[in-house]
Structures are given as structure tokens and as C-alpha cells.
Image (cartoon, rainbow, N blue to C red):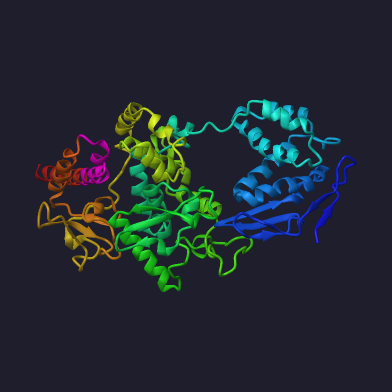
Amino acid sequence: MSQTIEPGSSTALAITLPERVFTRSGTSFDPGENLWEWADGPFNARIDFRRYRDGFEVFVPALKQALLPFVKGHSSAHVVNLQNAFYYFLRTMQTCPEGAISAQHIADYAAKVGVDESWRVGTLNGLLQKWVALALPGVEPQCATYLLERRKCGNKKGEAVRTRNPVEGPLSEEEYTALYSVANAAYGRGHFPLWMLLLTRLLLACGGRISQYASLKLCDFDGDKSELSLPQAKTGEEHTRSSFILFDISPQTGRLISDYINGLCAEGYDGNSAFFPQSLVMPRGTRKQLRGIDHLFYGHCDPNGLSRRFKTLVAEIAPPTSRLDFAPLPLTPQRFRYTFGTRLAEEGASRVVIANRLGHADLQNVEVYVSASPKIVENIDRTMEALLAPLARAFKGQVVEDEAHSTHKGAPGSRIIDFRVSNDPVGSCGGKGSNCAFNKPLACYTCFRFEPWLDAPHVKVLERLLGEREKWLTDDRMAAINDGPIWAVQEVIVHCTQIWQQRAQRASEAAS
């Protein structure tokens, strides 16, 4: 039996809502309730109509009816955005209008919002066009005509990428390298959980939307091939796990993922479990469990919650950036996506390849990546290089006299040797190399557990790294891969030189 609601306005007709409405993803809820909550793939959608007060609640019945077609055919995020646009519009009014919303109300609202928020009018247009088309009370038909005739401003798509915005745009090469280094160090110190390190690396490696990572399952990683099948988003299909994009994962990250999966399986998870389980990632869980145990996304994090959790944790280790006067680097999942697309374009990838890797259905959204001038990027990187080099502080360990003065004094697994330059050790590992999947000895120089020996062949290690760098002089991206370790080895050599000089000076003073 359907439910009839009277809006309480003299100009309003009775609004009849169905007893249940089914969403695009197949879930359902009672639209007559004043709190709408439903699961949409990995997303948790929530609209609270109880916040409409002081007379504005008169619009709620018609608003619900106008939203229903979007609930049935669009993503939950779109439905929530439409409702938020309408609520924000009403908030700009001091009092509830008598009768229906007129074109003048829309014009006044458009004049009030700033340039940066002019997109709100465009979002409101989508809802009000449907409102008028359904002949619902509360909005005059002239509103639809006015909005169609008015030039609607939307988001300036790609502006952050095009201008290399230091807050919202892609990361520079130095920022990319610094973030990679501090994330490894934070994990090594125990300040970063493994799931967070892996999410950071996968964001850098695949450039996916946060909803794609929230949809991942343990079975999506093939350890034998070191390949990740990343669920696609915004495809118009029923949910994000309807199609996938295949990504090759580096052996080092692949080993970390395998260890991570093995650890989760030992705790009772299986291949159909979420790659980033809600029970592991979210310390307080969600407000309400909207999925049964047989639901495809049972146990998965809500993408918005995963994004907030990521931003909270990564802010604690964010490296400084000279582009913002050495303030901490602002980081959001979206910036990783911009960085991934930008790096593809700079490496010469075609529009088709960029669109495929980013999961775009057409080429219109990738133009911004290839249109940005590589010369601008080159100039920015060259300017930043001199500023960031002394800031890097790539070496985070502590120089020791020899093995006898190291933490573990020669215990198995503690010696670090670069056989490509010498059979003599370059130092010791304060963690005895346990559970370390990083590339030794290259990664050791940037690890806080590394204890380089005072009299060791560090110069030979540096010569090898510089020699390898010269092989890639025609490819700036490849040449810069080992810049972090190169800086760290240089710092170790400086530390050792200073110690020898201090000793020589003391010996000279004692002799005199």
C-alpha cells in the first residue's frame, strides 16, 4: 500500500510515495522515512531529511519524489549531491518563501554564490529540471526555463592539472620521491600500518579512484604474476566489480602484498574478503551495517570513509614541499590520480593509453594531461631541484665505527653487502633484515635502521649509482629513480668524512 504525504502548503498537491524504492545496485528502502540509508556497491548513502526545519520541511515530500528517479538510475553519490545542492540553496534564504520557489529566487541565489561555487547552480539545475518535469509542487515551471537559458558554470575541469596546482594538482617529481621515502620510513618505524603503505603505493602505481581500492578483494592480486586486477568505477554498470583493469605491480610491492594477504588469511580472511577490510581500517566502524554477510561488498570500507582515514594518516608523515614554503605536502587520493595521468603523458603515452589506464570511457577527460606543456614541468623541476636537495635528508640512520659497534654485532642477517662493488660490508641492519622486502643495499641507505660503517666502500657504491644514472641521461624520469639513495649515500660519505676530519684535528691538537 502506497503512502500519501500532504506537504502542508495551500499550493501543494498530495505527494504519493511508493512503499519501497529499489536503487540501481538492487538494494531497497522505504522512501517515506525521513532518514534514507542504503548500500550502493561499496558506498554507504545517507540523506537525513530531518534537517529541513523552520518551515522549509514543506519542500521535503516533493523533494523526495524528485529524487526517486535518480535513486533508481544513478549513483548514490549523485543523489546525495543533488539533495545537498537543494539544501544549500534553501540555506541562503532567511525565511521560507510563501508559495513556490520562483525564477527570482534562483537568480538571487546565483548572484550570491561566489565564482568558486558557481557550479552549485549547475547541480541544482539537474534536480529542478526533473522537479518541474514531474509537475511537482513547490517549484514554478519558469525556474526550469530560466536555468536552461542561463549559462551554467561548472567546475573548471582539469584546472588543477593544467596549472600544476601545488595544493590540488599532480605531485612534482621531488614530492613524489619524498613521499615514497617517508612512507617507507614510517612503515619501518611502525608509525604506518602495512595496509596504509600498500594503499599509498597502489595509488601511486595505478592512479585509481578511492572507490576502486575500496572495492578490491584479496583474490584480485595474482602473486605468481605480480598483477593486480583493479575494479573499474564510473562505468554505468551495476557496481565497481563488474569490470577490471589489469596492472603490473613491482616485485618489491608484490612481495609486500603477498605478506599482507598471508597475514590476513591467517586471521580468518579469505580470497573473497575485502583487500582493505573495514574491521582493519576503520577504528570505530560505521554508523550502521547496511550489508548482510552474503552481500558482495560485505566487510568493505565505504570509499568516503577510506578516503578520510587515508588523509588523516598520510597527513602525519607528509614531507615538506618548497612549492608551499616548505609546509607539509597536502595529500588527497585525487592528487595521486592526477599524478599518475600526468606521468603517463610526460612519458609519451597516447590519449587512448591514458584513458584506458585511468578507466575513462572516452578521451575528453584526458586532454588536460597531454595539453600541459612539458617545458613548464621541466622548468619547475629544475627550479625545485636545487631547493629540495638539501631538504631531502635522505639518510636517516646512524654511522657506527664498525661491526663491533653495531646494534647486533654481526648477528645473522645484520650484514649489508653490495657485491657489485665489493665483498666488504657497507654496514649493518638494526633490524637484522627481518621481514624486509626492500631492495638491498639500495634501500638500506634511506632506512632509519641502517648503520653504515665508518670505514666501508661507500664511495664505490656512489660511483656505481652515478654510473647507472648516466645510462639514462636521455630519460629524466628513469635517471631520477635512484636519486633518493644517491643523496643518502652522499650524506653518509659526508658524515664519515667529517668524523675522520674531527679525529685528525684532535690528533693534531694533541701532538702540538
In the image as oriented, which residue stretches furthest toward the right? Answer: 10
Q: At x 33% / y 26%, what residue is drawn?
A: 375
Q: Dividing the picture into quarters, in which one does residue 3 lie? A: bottom right
Classified by dominant secondary structure, the portion drawn in magenta counts as: helix
Which contiguous range is marked in magenta?
A: 474-492
Residue 332 visible: no
Residue 83 visible: yes
In the displayed structure, would residue 367 be above or below residue 464? Answer: above
375, 330: nearer the viewer: 375
Locate residue 196, reporting x and y percent: 43, 56
Q: Dividing the picture into quarters, in which one does residue 425 lie? A: bottom left
Q: Is residue 440 left or right of residue 92?
A: left
Q: At x 27% / y 39%, what residue is drawn?
A: 477
- On-image quarter of the C terminus: top left
In the displayed structure, would residue 268 be above or below residue 244? Answer: below
Locate residue 436, reporting x and y percent: 29, 61
453, 373: nearer the viewer: 373
Q: Dividing the picture into quarters, in which one does residue 94 lie? A: top right
Locate residue 117, reporting x and y percent: 62, 32
Locate residue 414, reporting x and y percent: 21, 63
In the image, residue 489 lies in the stretch drawn in magenta: yes
In the image, residue 337 lies in the stretch drawn in magenta: no
Q: Is residue 467 left or right of residue 238?
A: left
328, 381: nearer the viewer: 381
- On-image quarter of the N terminus: bottom right
Q: At x 30% / y 30%, what residue is drawn?
A: 382
Q: At x 33% / y 29%, what residue is drawn?
A: 374
Q: Is residue 471 left or right of residue 298?
A: left
Q: Is residue 477 left or right of residue 145?
A: left
